[in-house]
Amino acid sequence: MPGRPPKNEVPATGAPRPARSCLVRRMNSAAVDRRRTLPLLLLTVVAATVVAAVVLAGCSDSAGSATPGEGDGGDGVRVLFAGSLIIPFAQLEEEFETAHPGIDVNMEGHGSIQAIRIVSDLHELADLVVTADYQLIPMLLYQTQDPDSGLPYAGWSVVFATNKMALAYSPDSAFATEIGADNWFDIINRDGVRLGCSDPRLDANGYRALMTVKLAEGFYGRPDLFTKTFGGVFRIPVRVSETGDGAIITVPEVLETKSGSHVVLRPYSVNLLPLLKSGDIDYAFEYESVIEQHGLKYVSLPPEIDLGDPACADLYRSVTVKLDFQRFTSVEPVFRGEPIRYGVTIPANARDPGAAESLLAYLLGPEGQRIMAENYQPMITPALTDDLDGLPESIKVLCTSGD
């Protein structure tokens, strides 16, 4: 289903668990202006930032499996989802509950890695897990066992949406009247310009920002671009090594910017939006859908570097990001570049799998497609799955086999 045409684009030429719901439910009015969601976003950001600090410090033994009504988000369908979906999922929650008055939905927005780790490492119960990088589900949930059942947390996933990386800015950003597709890489490195990035240890957008800048080196013929942008920024450097298969970007366990750095690091990409609007930063790597939802301007990046074009998949695979620490329980956190694809699963130990199936079917069906299109979020229709036979029947009819 086609969405509304982009309106702010510059065209391209070449540990305690979080609060009960990180996403405060909208008022029950279909006429709510999308720009009034900023206060909701700020509440989400506060809760998510606290969780990020807790998880990076390690998972305590006291954060064991939750029981319904006690540390699991309360009654209802608990949805852990990528923060880039905050606005469309607020509308999804509102409309689904109207259509299904017997089901209460509790939405929690997080960075994609954090959303997964709440289940895989903190062993909390959830009914739906939605990430901006579908790879995280097999990587972290297929390979990790529920300590109560001894079974993997998930055995299937559905790929249902896509996106593109872009460079967001406001009319008040430094050099806003000059920036375009042919000079953005120079402008973000000018004196006095502040660039926002999300933390690649927590957020898929963060490691994709690193990939985008590295890919831009080859596309624009600027072999020093990654070093100019991120070199000398962090107390412990982000390292790049070239191999026969491409570039490997290694992110250290401790990632802190130096005093006076031109890069501003925040846990999740949605943390950067208020900073753009307030003028505390000038530019930020964001998803195009999120930029449109918030009425910001952006530079549309060429498909060779925006991680949004399946035709460029081989090129994207030339860049890999490796997280150089082992806070993951059973896997090596290595992310190879590929087209952006969102994934969703129902954990094997979901509290209410029937209600979760209903919500997922609503998301993948005509109403969910409409909601996502209204919020500039591209969908993949039909959705793709790695295990068609393993899907619930209500979901299977909305999917086809595919990677």
Image (spheres, rainbow, N blue to C red):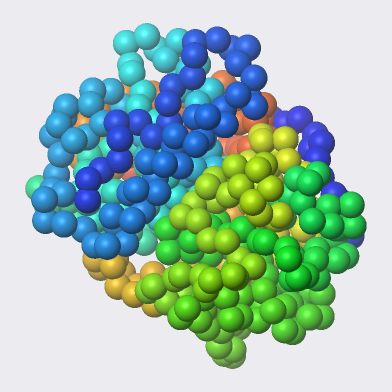
Residue at 61% from the left image edge and 31% from the top image edge = 372
Residue 247 sits in quarter = bottom right
Q: Residue lying furthest front in this view?
A: 260
Foreground pick, 207 / 257:
257
Is 176 left, or right, of 84 in this rendering? right
Q: Give whichever of 372, 172 is nearer the camera.
A: 172
- Tell me: 321 left or right of 344: right
**For residue 71, side relative to residue 131 (left or right):** left
- Residue 210: give x, y in percent of width and height: 59, 69
| Figure quadrant of the N terminus | top right
Residue 267 pos. (x, y %): 46, 55
- Vertical comparison of 284 with 370: above or below: below
Whether residue 3 is situated above or below residue 274 in the rendered picture: above
Count of number-bearing discs: 0
The answer to whether one can see residue 49 in this image is yes
- Percent across and percent down for residue 63 are 16, 49
Which residue occupies 30% across, 35% down? Answer: 19
Residue 156 horizontal/vertical position (percent): 36, 48
Image quadrant in which you'd find residue 47: top left
Using the image, determine if residue 31 lies above or below residue 16: above
Q: Is residue 116 visible from the viewing direction of this image?
A: no
* Residue drawn at (81%, 80%) of the image: 221
Which residue is painted at 61% across and 80% down in the image? Answer: 231
Task: Please determine whether, in this image, residue 286 is positioned above or below residue 235.
Answer: above
Lateral position of residue 317 relative to residue 90, left or right:
right
